[in-house]
Amino acid sequence: MFRKLILGILAVGFTAISCSDDDGNMDVNAGAISGGPFEFNVDGEADFVSGIILDDTHVVGSNSTWVITDDSGNILGLPPTLEAVEGVNFDGAGAGTCLIWYLRYEDDTAGVEVGENTSNITGTFDFSNSIEVIRNQVTNAGTLSGGPFEFDVDGEADFVSGIVLDDTNAFGTNSTWVITDDLGNILGLPPTLEAVEGVNFDGAGAGTCLIWYLRYEDDLQGAEMGMNANDLTGTFDLSNSIAVVRNQVTNAGTLSGGPFSFKIDGEADFVSGIVLDDANAFGTNSTWVITDDLGNILGLPPTLEAVEGVDFDGAGAGTCLIWYLRYEDDLQGAEMGMNANDLTGTFDLSNSIEVVRSCGVTNAGVLSGGPFNFTVDGDSDFVSGISLDDMNASGSNSTWVITDDLGNILGLPPTLDAVEGVDFNGAGVGTCLIWYLRYEDGLQGAEMGMNAGDLLGCFSLSNSIEVIRAEAP
């Protein structure tokens, strides 16, 4: 009947066309038409014009017809009567703009045919003014109800259900369902609601999906996976969306066993009997974590067997905490020297098991000898005759310590012989103190430049022997 019109062409009016004889007398007159303009939605519902009036008071011309053109003047139809014009279903013409004209003409007129253009008509004729008929292409996707849905990404399949599409007023030649992320990126185009309800949202990982229903015409572009629904072009309508929130969860399970208490005495101390209840544990990756009581990460043994191979005696005095960690690939901060309180990403720490490492008995014994008085005069000054009563001494390790009178460590001679080899004249004027130190592994602060008052760990210092270095007279 009518050719389908191209969307978006702007309406263009035509000036009434007439022909006259050589004397300038008007031979034909189409009169004037009134009514409209008309505007319809191309939505599958029939659209008819009505109320058009032809003022034919001064109409002249042997022949007449009504003419329907597009907005470029192309003749789409030639209904012979106004009744025939009002019987035309403009919805069937598709989107665009039509113009309705009344034509009076004589027998010499040529070119009044469907498919021709009014600009090519020749002979004696006259067009009335035109009435515009605008046909808007519309689509309506209807309305969705159901949800929203919220799932845990935990390895268990998650399906939506109970979504209802109210498509009472929906219109559009084609349809599909669309699943996007929360930025509109198209993740899937399931063709039916059944297909939507067959999607396992657990497999999509953490985030938010949106479910839409789409009605569209053949000119739609951009409805492809990997594209963005915000960039769709053509004639289409998206329904409201239903949110599917997918929460990434991890569960480290529960530890039992312990607590453990050891003495730092040079004997190896291992934990045992720890049990992990991981019946409900979830997380792609796992490790064990050992921290101090402030959360500082001391070790990351990969297995429980590795945990049970840790010698806690070597850690020195203090408290350790044993944890089990489940996590996803976005975890950050799980490194020795970092703090477990600063972990970021998707993870879960189990409860902790305490390992208390108490100082065992350390006793440095008693020194006798001295005190010593030297004159700083350039002559070497050595101590001698110092005795160590170590009958009750204990501690896996030992050293001698020389400090100034404020406790600043000046030297750590390993043996008494090494102490008696120290030339105190070279130390200048002042007072030195000689000590004997017994300690366990893990001692901190026993370094030259440090202060003996800041030693940490399991240790015992003997009494001190004074070495006074006076200025020469």
Image (cartoon, rainbow, N blue to C red):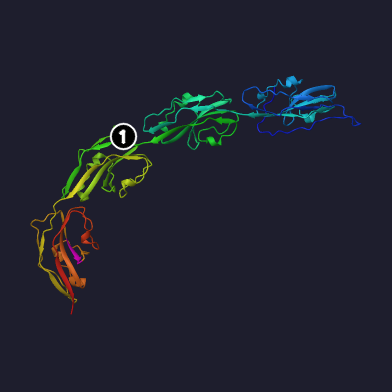
Confirm whether residue 83 shows in the render.
yes
The image position of residue 181, as x and y in percent, is 47, 35
Most extreme residue toward the bottom is 473
The N terminus lies in quadrant: top right
Q: Taking 147 as reference, is 57 left or right?
A: right
In the picture, residue 309 is in which quadrant?
top left
Q: Residue at x 51, y 31 (%)?
A: 240
Magenta span includes 401? yes
Q: Nearer the viewer, residue 390 or 144?
A: 144
Label total for image: 1
The image position of residue 321, as x and y in percent, is 25, 44
Q: Taking 131 as reference, is 143 left or right?
A: left
Residue assigned mark 1:
281
Q: Taking 113 as reference, is 319 left or right?
A: left
Confirm whether residue 311 shows in the render.
no
Question: Is residue 260 positioned above or below 37 on the image?
Answer: below
Q: Nearer the viewer, residue 129 or 396?
A: 129
Question: Is residue 67 positioned above or below 400 on the image?
Answer: above
The C terminus lies in quadrant: bottom left
Amino acid bearing label 1 = Ala
Q: Residue at x 23, y 56 (%)?
A: 444
Q: Nearer the viewer, residue 307 or 263?
A: 263
Q: Taking 370 as reference, is 135 left or right?
A: right
Magenta span includes 204? no
Q: Secondary structure at mark 1?
A: loop
Q: Magenta span covers which residues? A: 400-405
The image position of residue 393, as x and y in percent, is 11, 56
The image position of residue 358, as x and y in percent, is 18, 49
Instruction: Count neighbours of disc 1 (C-alpha within 10 A) and say few if under 14, some if 14 to 19, many if 20 or more.
Output: some
